[in-house]
Image (cartoon, rainbow, N blue to C red):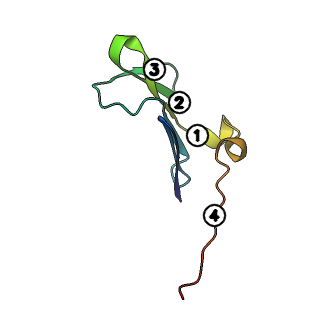
Amino acid sequence: MYSTVNSNNMTIHYDSNTDLLYLRLDTTKQTVINKQVSEDITLDMGIDDKIVGIEILDASKKVALADLLPLHYELKKAS
């Protein structure tokens, strides 16, 4: 399952098949440099060395996903 949540200028992507969480903090198009800060966490550094994205591997072991991804939706029957 792949989930995406948008909030103003931030986007959260989670792929439960790979347990990968990606937080995009600034959706402005820009060139980024990846900076690996640990084995499972990589930062995307943008203009002026600002953090514009965070990738977390094995996310369910490191983040309270239920609190971060409160996805609620309804499926409506077609009329």
Task: Please rate how many residues cluster around mark 3, counting C-alpha atoms within 10 Å: few if below 14, some from 14 to 19, many from 20.
Answer: some
Residue holding disc 3: 51
Residue holding disc 1: 58
Q: CA distance from mark 1 to mark 3?
A: 20 Å
Nearer to the camera, 38 or 55 = 55
Dots 2 and 1: beta carbons under 8 Å? Answer: yes
State the residue at coordinates (53%, 30%): 40
SS for callout 4? loop
State the residue at coordinates (55%, 47%): 19
Tell me the quarter of the picture where residue 77 sits.
Answer: bottom right
Query: What's the residue type where badge 3 is placed?
Result: Ile
Q: CA distance from mark 1 to mark 4?
A: 25 Å
Nearer to the camera, 30 or 9 = 9
Residue holding disc 2: 40
| Percent coordinates x, y for residue 67 in the rendering | 72, 42
Of mark 3 and mark 4, the one earlier in the sequence is 3
Task: Please rate how many residues cluster around mark 1, counting C-alpha atoms within 10 Å: few if below 14, some from 14 to 19, many from 20.
Answer: some
Q: Please indicate whether residue 35 sits to the left or right of residue 57 in the image.
A: left
Which of the two marks, 1 or 4, is nearer to us in this view? 4
SS for callout 3? strand
Q: CA distance from mark 2 to mark 1?
A: 7 Å
Q: CA distance from mark 3 to mark 4?
A: 31 Å
Which of the two marks, 4 or 2, is nearer to us in this view? 4
Query: What's the residue type where badge 1 is placed?
Result: Asp
